[in-house]
Image (cartoon, grey):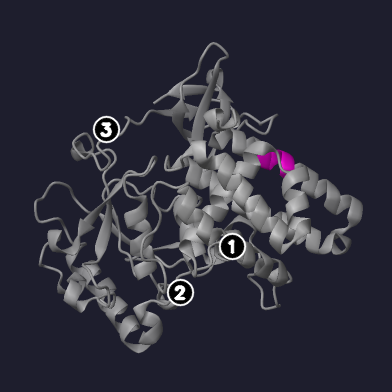
Protein backbone atom coordinates (compact mmCIF):
# COMPACT_ATOMS: atom_id res chain seq x y z
CA UNK A 1 0.00 0.00 0.00
CA UNK A 2 1.25 3.48 -0.86
CA UNK A 3 2.55 5.73 1.89
CA UNK A 4 -0.09 8.32 2.96
CA UNK A 5 2.20 11.11 1.74
CA UNK A 6 1.73 9.96 -1.85
CA UNK A 7 -1.94 10.82 -1.60
CA UNK A 8 -1.30 14.45 -0.71
CA UNK A 9 2.09 15.09 -2.29
CA UNK A 10 2.15 18.44 -4.07
CA UNK A 11 4.63 20.97 -5.37
CA UNK A 12 3.67 23.25 -2.46
CA UNK A 13 4.58 20.57 0.12
CA UNK A 14 7.86 19.91 -1.68
CA UNK A 15 8.62 23.64 -1.78
CA UNK A 16 8.08 23.82 1.98
CA UNK A 17 10.44 20.87 2.50
CA UNK A 18 13.03 22.51 0.24
CA UNK A 19 12.77 25.69 2.32
CA UNK A 20 13.43 23.72 5.52
CA UNK A 21 16.37 21.94 3.93
CA UNK A 22 17.83 25.26 2.70
CA UNK A 23 17.62 26.76 6.19
CA UNK A 24 19.50 23.80 7.67
CA UNK A 25 22.02 23.91 4.82
CA UNK A 26 22.79 27.59 5.43
CA UNK A 27 23.05 27.02 9.18
CA UNK A 28 25.64 24.30 8.62
CA UNK A 29 27.63 26.60 6.36
CA UNK A 30 27.71 29.25 9.08
CA UNK A 31 28.70 26.79 11.82
CA UNK A 32 31.24 24.80 9.82
CA UNK A 33 32.46 27.44 7.40
CA UNK A 34 32.28 27.14 3.63
CA UNK A 35 35.65 25.40 3.31
CA UNK A 36 35.08 22.92 6.13
CA UNK A 37 31.64 21.95 4.79
CA UNK A 38 33.46 20.47 1.80
CA UNK A 39 32.12 17.46 -0.01
CA UNK A 40 29.12 17.07 2.31
CA UNK A 41 27.93 20.49 1.22
CA UNK A 42 28.33 19.54 -2.43
CA UNK A 43 26.26 16.41 -1.86
CA UNK A 44 23.52 18.55 -0.31
CA UNK A 45 23.71 20.90 -3.29
CA UNK A 46 23.14 18.11 -5.81
CA UNK A 47 20.30 16.63 -3.74
CA UNK A 48 18.77 20.12 -3.66
CA UNK A 49 18.98 20.36 -7.45
CA UNK A 50 17.44 16.90 -7.90
CA UNK A 51 14.64 17.88 -5.52
CA UNK A 52 13.87 21.07 -7.45
CA UNK A 53 13.82 19.10 -10.69
CA UNK A 54 11.45 16.56 -9.11
CA UNK A 55 9.15 19.34 -7.88
CA UNK A 56 8.87 20.65 -11.44
CA UNK A 57 8.14 17.19 -12.87
CA UNK A 58 5.52 16.56 -10.17
CA UNK A 59 3.65 19.67 -11.35
CA UNK A 60 3.38 18.22 -14.87
CA UNK A 61 0.93 15.53 -13.72
CA UNK A 62 2.89 12.60 -15.15
CA UNK A 63 4.03 10.95 -11.88
CA UNK A 64 2.37 7.73 -10.68
CA UNK A 65 2.44 8.52 -6.96
CA UNK A 66 1.46 4.95 -6.05
CA UNK A 67 4.88 3.84 -7.31
CA UNK A 68 6.83 6.44 -5.35
CA UNK A 69 7.63 4.29 -2.29
CA UNK A 70 9.17 1.56 -4.47
CA UNK A 71 11.01 4.18 -6.51
CA UNK A 72 12.36 5.81 -3.34
CA UNK A 73 13.67 2.44 -2.17
CA UNK A 74 15.49 2.05 -5.50
CA UNK A 75 17.06 5.50 -5.16
CA UNK A 76 18.08 4.81 -1.57
CA UNK A 77 19.68 1.51 -2.67
CA UNK A 78 21.62 3.31 -5.43
CA UNK A 79 22.85 5.95 -2.97
CA UNK A 80 23.89 3.30 -0.46
CA UNK A 81 25.80 1.35 -3.13
CA UNK A 82 27.61 4.36 -4.54
CA UNK A 83 28.20 6.54 -1.46
CA UNK A 84 27.00 6.02 2.11
CA UNK A 85 27.35 9.74 2.88
CA UNK A 86 24.75 10.64 0.24
CA UNK A 87 22.43 7.98 1.65
CA UNK A 88 22.83 9.32 5.19
CA UNK A 89 21.97 12.88 4.08
CA UNK A 90 18.98 11.59 2.10
CA UNK A 91 17.61 9.63 5.09
CA UNK A 92 18.44 11.98 7.96
CA UNK A 93 18.16 15.51 6.56
CA UNK A 94 15.46 15.40 3.89
CA UNK A 95 11.81 15.52 4.87
CA UNK A 96 9.62 12.91 3.19
CA UNK A 97 8.15 15.20 0.46
CA UNK A 98 11.67 16.23 -0.54
CA UNK A 99 12.82 12.60 -0.58
CA UNK A 100 10.03 11.87 -3.05
CA UNK A 101 10.94 14.91 -5.14
CA UNK A 102 14.59 13.81 -5.29
CA UNK A 103 13.34 10.36 -6.33
CA UNK A 104 11.33 11.84 -9.20
CA UNK A 105 14.28 13.96 -10.33
CA UNK A 106 16.65 10.99 -10.22
CA UNK A 107 14.26 8.80 -12.22
CA UNK A 108 13.97 11.46 -14.93
CA UNK A 109 17.75 11.74 -15.08
CA UNK A 110 18.00 7.95 -15.41
CA UNK A 111 15.49 8.03 -18.27
CA UNK A 112 17.62 10.67 -20.05
CA UNK A 113 20.95 8.78 -19.87
CA UNK A 114 23.50 9.25 -21.45
CA UNK A 115 22.65 12.98 -21.45
CA UNK A 116 23.44 14.65 -18.11
CA UNK A 117 20.51 16.65 -16.76
CA UNK A 118 21.54 17.45 -13.17
CA UNK A 119 24.62 19.54 -13.98
CA UNK A 120 22.95 21.97 -16.41
CA UNK A 121 19.77 22.23 -14.32
CA UNK A 122 21.95 22.96 -11.29
CA UNK A 123 23.64 25.83 -13.12
CA UNK A 124 20.24 27.44 -13.31
CA UNK A 125 19.13 26.62 -9.74
CA UNK A 126 22.38 27.43 -7.88
CA UNK A 127 24.34 29.32 -10.59
CA UNK A 128 27.32 27.02 -10.16
CA UNK A 129 30.05 26.21 -12.63
CA UNK A 130 29.89 29.43 -14.65
CA UNK A 131 33.51 30.48 -13.99
CA UNK A 132 36.71 29.23 -15.60
CA UNK A 133 37.96 27.35 -12.53
CA UNK A 134 37.39 23.57 -12.36
CA UNK A 135 34.10 22.82 -10.63
CA UNK A 136 34.88 21.38 -7.15
CA UNK A 137 31.60 19.45 -7.33
CA UNK A 138 32.87 17.30 -10.17
CA UNK A 139 33.72 14.31 -7.95
CA UNK A 140 30.26 14.44 -6.37
CA UNK A 141 28.66 14.60 -9.82
CA UNK A 142 30.58 11.48 -10.77
CA UNK A 143 29.05 9.72 -7.75
CA UNK A 144 25.58 10.82 -8.79
CA UNK A 145 26.25 9.62 -12.34
CA UNK A 146 26.93 6.19 -10.85
CA UNK A 147 23.64 6.32 -8.93
CA UNK A 148 21.72 7.33 -12.04
CA UNK A 149 23.31 4.55 -14.08
CA UNK A 150 22.25 2.04 -11.43
CA UNK A 151 18.70 3.40 -11.56
CA UNK A 152 18.30 2.72 -15.29
CA UNK A 153 17.13 -0.83 -14.61
CA UNK A 154 14.72 0.38 -11.92
CA UNK A 155 13.13 2.90 -14.32
CA UNK A 156 12.15 0.04 -16.62
CA UNK A 157 10.69 -2.05 -13.78
CA UNK A 158 8.84 0.65 -11.81
CA UNK A 159 7.50 3.01 -14.54
CA UNK A 160 7.24 5.98 -12.20
CA UNK A 161 6.78 8.49 -15.03
CA UNK A 162 3.86 8.15 -17.44
CA UNK A 163 5.94 9.68 -20.22
CA UNK A 164 9.65 10.35 -20.70
CA UNK A 165 11.68 12.34 -23.28
CA UNK A 166 12.00 9.85 -26.15
CA UNK A 167 15.08 10.01 -28.37
CA UNK A 168 17.19 12.36 -26.25
CA UNK A 169 20.40 10.32 -26.61
CA UNK A 170 23.09 12.08 -28.65
CA UNK A 171 21.20 15.35 -29.01
CA UNK A 172 23.54 17.77 -27.19
CA UNK A 173 25.44 19.02 -30.23
CA UNK A 174 23.29 21.01 -32.60
CA UNK A 175 23.94 21.22 -36.31
CA UNK A 176 25.52 24.63 -35.92
CA UNK A 177 28.22 23.19 -33.70
CA UNK A 178 29.35 21.08 -36.65
CA UNK A 179 29.04 23.81 -39.24
CA UNK A 180 29.01 27.17 -37.48
CA UNK A 181 30.23 29.09 -40.53
CA UNK A 182 26.99 28.25 -42.32
CA UNK A 183 24.77 28.65 -39.28
CA UNK A 184 25.61 32.26 -38.48
CA UNK A 185 24.93 33.60 -42.00
CA UNK A 186 21.64 31.64 -42.01
CA UNK A 187 20.56 33.29 -38.76
CA UNK A 188 21.56 36.71 -40.04
CA UNK A 189 19.44 36.12 -43.15
CA UNK A 190 16.50 35.08 -40.97
CA UNK A 191 16.80 38.25 -38.89
CA UNK A 192 17.02 40.41 -42.01
CA UNK A 193 14.00 38.75 -43.65
CA UNK A 194 11.95 38.98 -40.47
CA UNK A 195 12.63 42.71 -40.21
CA UNK A 196 11.72 43.17 -43.86
CA UNK A 197 8.64 40.96 -44.20
CA UNK A 198 7.50 40.34 -40.64
CA UNK A 199 7.26 36.93 -38.99
CA UNK A 200 5.83 33.87 -40.77
CA UNK A 201 2.11 33.26 -40.32
CA UNK A 202 -0.05 30.10 -40.16
CA UNK A 203 -1.61 29.26 -43.52
CA UNK A 204 -5.09 28.84 -42.05
CA UNK A 205 -5.04 32.36 -40.58
CA UNK A 206 -6.38 31.09 -37.25
CA UNK A 207 -4.11 33.44 -35.27
CA UNK A 208 -1.39 36.01 -35.81
CA UNK A 209 2.28 35.52 -34.99
CA UNK A 210 3.66 38.81 -33.70
CA UNK A 211 7.13 37.81 -32.49
CA UNK A 212 9.65 35.01 -33.04
CA UNK A 213 12.09 33.81 -30.38
CA UNK A 214 14.97 31.36 -30.17
CA UNK A 215 16.19 29.75 -26.96
CA UNK A 216 19.95 29.42 -26.74
CA UNK A 217 20.18 27.71 -23.29
CA UNK A 218 23.94 28.26 -23.35
CA UNK A 219 24.72 30.46 -20.38
CA UNK A 220 22.08 31.32 -17.78
CA UNK A 221 23.95 34.50 -16.83
CA UNK A 222 23.18 36.08 -20.21
CA UNK A 223 19.50 35.20 -20.28
CA UNK A 224 17.87 32.28 -22.01
CA UNK A 225 15.70 33.58 -24.82
CA UNK A 226 16.72 35.75 -27.78
CA UNK A 227 14.25 37.91 -29.69
CA UNK A 228 14.76 37.36 -33.42
CA UNK A 229 14.43 41.08 -34.14
CA UNK A 230 16.73 42.28 -31.41
CA UNK A 231 19.72 39.95 -31.80
CA UNK A 232 23.19 41.39 -32.17
CA UNK A 233 26.41 39.59 -33.10
CA UNK A 234 27.09 38.31 -29.59
CA UNK A 235 23.59 36.84 -29.36
CA UNK A 236 24.16 35.04 -32.65
CA UNK A 237 27.17 33.26 -31.19
CA UNK A 238 25.20 32.33 -28.07
CA UNK A 239 22.49 30.72 -30.20
CA UNK A 240 24.82 28.51 -32.20
CA UNK A 241 26.65 26.98 -29.24
CA UNK A 242 25.45 23.48 -28.26
CA UNK A 243 22.38 23.54 -26.05
CA UNK A 244 22.67 21.83 -22.67
CA UNK A 245 19.64 19.57 -21.95
CA UNK A 246 19.68 20.45 -18.24
CA UNK A 247 19.68 24.16 -19.01
CA UNK A 248 16.84 23.64 -21.47
CA UNK A 249 14.75 22.04 -18.72
CA UNK A 250 15.62 24.92 -16.38
CA UNK A 251 14.53 27.42 -19.04
CA UNK A 252 11.24 25.59 -19.62
CA UNK A 253 10.27 24.55 -16.10
CA UNK A 254 11.78 27.26 -13.88
CA UNK A 255 12.58 30.34 -15.96
CA UNK A 256 9.15 30.25 -17.63
CA UNK A 257 10.37 30.45 -21.23
CA UNK A 258 7.37 28.38 -22.40
CA UNK A 259 4.93 30.82 -20.81
CA UNK A 260 4.83 32.72 -24.07
CA UNK A 261 2.58 35.68 -24.73
CA UNK A 262 -0.26 35.24 -27.19
CA UNK A 263 1.12 35.34 -30.72
CA UNK A 264 4.72 34.56 -29.80
CA UNK A 265 6.52 31.71 -31.53
CA UNK A 266 9.56 29.80 -30.30
CA UNK A 267 11.69 28.15 -33.00
CA UNK A 268 13.65 25.07 -31.76
CA UNK A 269 17.28 25.07 -32.87
CA UNK A 270 18.39 21.61 -31.73
CA UNK A 271 17.05 18.07 -31.66
CA UNK A 272 17.16 18.05 -27.85
CA UNK A 273 14.85 21.04 -27.76
CA UNK A 274 12.33 19.34 -30.05
CA UNK A 275 12.48 16.13 -27.96
CA UNK A 276 11.66 18.07 -24.77
CA UNK A 277 8.88 20.07 -26.41
CA UNK A 278 7.18 16.94 -27.70
CA UNK A 279 7.49 15.46 -24.22
CA UNK A 280 6.02 18.52 -22.48
CA UNK A 281 3.18 19.19 -24.92
CA UNK A 282 -0.13 18.52 -23.19
CA UNK A 283 1.32 18.18 -19.67
CA UNK A 284 -0.29 20.09 -16.81
CA UNK A 285 0.55 23.80 -16.99
CA UNK A 286 1.76 23.63 -20.61
CA UNK A 287 -0.40 25.85 -22.81
CA UNK A 288 1.58 25.77 -26.05
CA UNK A 289 1.03 23.58 -29.07
CA UNK A 290 3.47 22.37 -31.70
CA UNK A 291 2.90 23.78 -35.17
CA UNK A 292 4.57 21.85 -38.05
CA UNK A 293 6.70 23.83 -40.49
CA UNK A 294 4.26 22.94 -43.26
CA UNK A 295 1.54 24.91 -41.46
CA UNK A 296 3.46 28.17 -41.99
CA UNK A 297 3.06 30.33 -45.07
CA UNK A 298 5.52 30.11 -47.96
CA UNK A 299 6.41 33.80 -48.00
CA UNK A 300 9.49 33.28 -45.83
CA UNK A 301 11.81 30.89 -47.67
CA UNK A 302 14.51 31.05 -44.99
CA UNK A 303 12.06 29.52 -42.52
CA UNK A 304 11.20 26.60 -44.81
CA UNK A 305 12.48 23.26 -43.54
CA UNK A 306 14.84 22.61 -46.43
CA UNK A 307 16.68 25.87 -45.74
CA UNK A 308 17.00 25.55 -41.98
CA UNK A 309 20.17 24.35 -40.33
CA UNK A 310 18.08 22.06 -38.15
CA UNK A 311 17.25 20.01 -41.24
CA UNK A 312 19.43 17.20 -39.92
CA UNK A 313 16.28 16.06 -38.06
CA UNK A 314 15.00 12.67 -39.27
CA UNK A 315 11.45 14.02 -39.04
CA UNK A 316 9.85 17.40 -39.62
CA UNK A 317 10.98 19.99 -37.10
CA UNK A 318 8.39 21.93 -35.15
CA UNK A 319 7.70 25.49 -34.16
CA UNK A 320 6.05 26.34 -30.86
CA UNK A 321 3.11 28.72 -30.84
CA UNK A 322 1.30 29.76 -27.69
CA UNK A 323 -2.46 29.26 -27.76
CA UNK A 324 -3.55 30.43 -24.30
CA UNK A 325 -5.94 33.36 -24.59
CA UNK A 326 -6.97 32.56 -28.16
CA UNK A 327 -10.25 31.12 -29.43
CA UNK A 328 -8.81 27.72 -30.24
CA UNK A 329 -7.79 27.04 -26.61
CA UNK A 330 -11.23 25.65 -25.84
CA UNK A 331 -11.12 23.28 -28.81
CA UNK A 332 -7.52 22.09 -28.44
CA UNK A 333 -7.37 18.99 -26.25
CA UNK A 334 -3.90 17.43 -26.49
CA UNK A 335 -4.63 14.92 -23.72
CA UNK A 336 -8.40 14.68 -24.21
CA UNK A 337 -9.01 17.17 -21.48
CA UNK A 338 -10.00 20.80 -21.50
CA UNK A 339 -7.50 23.44 -20.36
CA UNK A 340 -8.81 25.23 -17.29
CA UNK A 341 -9.59 28.92 -17.79
CA UNK A 342 -6.96 31.28 -16.50
CA UNK A 343 -7.90 33.65 -13.65
CA UNK A 344 -5.57 36.51 -12.90
CA UNK A 345 -5.51 38.83 -9.90
CA UNK A 346 -3.42 41.89 -9.06
CA UNK A 347 -1.60 42.52 -5.80
CA UNK A 348 -3.22 45.51 -4.09
CA UNK A 349 -0.66 45.64 -1.26
CA UNK A 350 2.86 44.37 -0.57
CA UNK A 351 2.98 41.07 1.32
CA UNK A 352 6.11 39.58 2.89
CA UNK A 353 6.05 35.82 3.29
CA UNK A 354 6.32 34.60 6.89
CA UNK A 355 6.37 30.85 6.21
CA UNK A 356 8.01 28.61 3.62
CA UNK A 357 4.70 27.88 1.84
CA UNK A 358 3.86 31.60 1.47
CA UNK A 359 4.84 33.85 -1.43
CA UNK A 360 6.08 37.43 -1.15
CA UNK A 361 4.38 39.83 -3.56
CA UNK A 362 4.64 43.51 -4.43
CA UNK A 363 1.81 45.93 -5.14
CA UNK A 364 0.97 45.74 -8.84
CA UNK A 365 2.20 42.16 -9.37
CA UNK A 366 -0.09 40.20 -11.72
CA UNK A 367 -0.68 36.71 -10.32
CA UNK A 368 -2.20 33.51 -11.70
CA UNK A 369 -4.63 31.80 -9.31
CA UNK A 370 -3.81 28.09 -8.93
CA UNK A 371 -6.27 27.38 -6.09
CA UNK A 372 -9.17 29.50 -4.93
CA UNK A 373 -9.45 30.63 -1.32
CA UNK A 374 -11.36 28.54 1.22
CA UNK A 375 -12.53 29.55 4.68
CA UNK A 376 -8.94 30.31 5.69
CA UNK A 377 -8.83 33.28 3.30
CA UNK A 378 -5.65 32.24 1.46
CA UNK A 379 -5.12 31.83 -2.29
CA UNK A 380 -2.46 29.68 -3.96
CA UNK A 381 -0.96 31.75 -6.78
CA UNK A 382 1.89 31.73 -9.27
CA UNK A 383 4.09 34.76 -9.88
CA UNK A 384 6.46 33.99 -12.76
CA UNK A 385 8.12 30.71 -11.82
CA UNK A 386 7.32 30.99 -8.07
CA UNK A 387 4.24 29.59 -6.33
CA UNK A 388 2.82 29.95 -2.85
CA UNK A 389 0.04 31.16 -0.56
CA UNK A 390 -1.04 34.80 -0.29
CA UNK A 391 -3.91 36.39 1.69
CA UNK A 392 -7.00 36.93 -0.43
CA UNK A 393 -7.45 40.38 1.12
CA UNK A 394 -4.13 41.52 -0.42
CA UNK A 395 -5.25 41.01 -4.04
CA UNK A 396 -8.04 42.20 -6.31
CA UNK A 397 -9.59 40.81 -9.49
CA UNK A 398 -8.53 41.96 -12.95
State the quadrant of the N terminus: top right
Name the residue at 24% across, 68% down.
Answer: 195
User: What residue would you read off at disc 2?
Assistant: 238
Mark 1 and mark 2: Cα distance apart in space: 35 Å
Q: Is residue 376 left or right of residue 384?
A: right
Determine whether the residue tagged by mark 3 lies in a helix, strand or loop.
loop
Of labels 1 and 3, the one closer to you: 1
Of labels 2 and 3, the one closer to you: 3
Could you say where residue 368 lies in the image, as x and y percent from the top left?
Answer: 44, 33
> 274 or 181, which lies in front?
274
Q: Is residue 206 above or below residue 251?
A: above
The residue segment tinted magenta is 17-21
Mark 1 and mark 3: Cα distance apart in space: 39 Å
User: What residue would you read off at disc 1?
Assistant: 150
Could you say where residue 157 lies in the image, as x and y percent from the top left?
Answer: 48, 52
Could you say where residue 345 lies in the image, as x and y percent from the top left?
Answer: 44, 27
Q: Is residue 20 above or below residue 213?
A: above
Q: Is residue 345 above or below residue 28?
A: above
Amino acid sequence: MADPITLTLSAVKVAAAIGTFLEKRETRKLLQGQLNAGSQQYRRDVLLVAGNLGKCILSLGIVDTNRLPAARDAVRSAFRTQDSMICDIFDEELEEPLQYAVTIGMFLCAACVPENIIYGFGQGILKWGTGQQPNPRRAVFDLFDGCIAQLQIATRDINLLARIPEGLSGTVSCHADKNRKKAIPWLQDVFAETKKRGPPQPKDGSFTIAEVKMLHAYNVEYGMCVNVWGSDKSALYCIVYPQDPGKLLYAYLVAGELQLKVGHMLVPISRAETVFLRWLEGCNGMTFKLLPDEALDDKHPKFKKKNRWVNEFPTTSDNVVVVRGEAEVAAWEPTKRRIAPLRMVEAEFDFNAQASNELSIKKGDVLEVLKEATDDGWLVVRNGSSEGDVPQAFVKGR
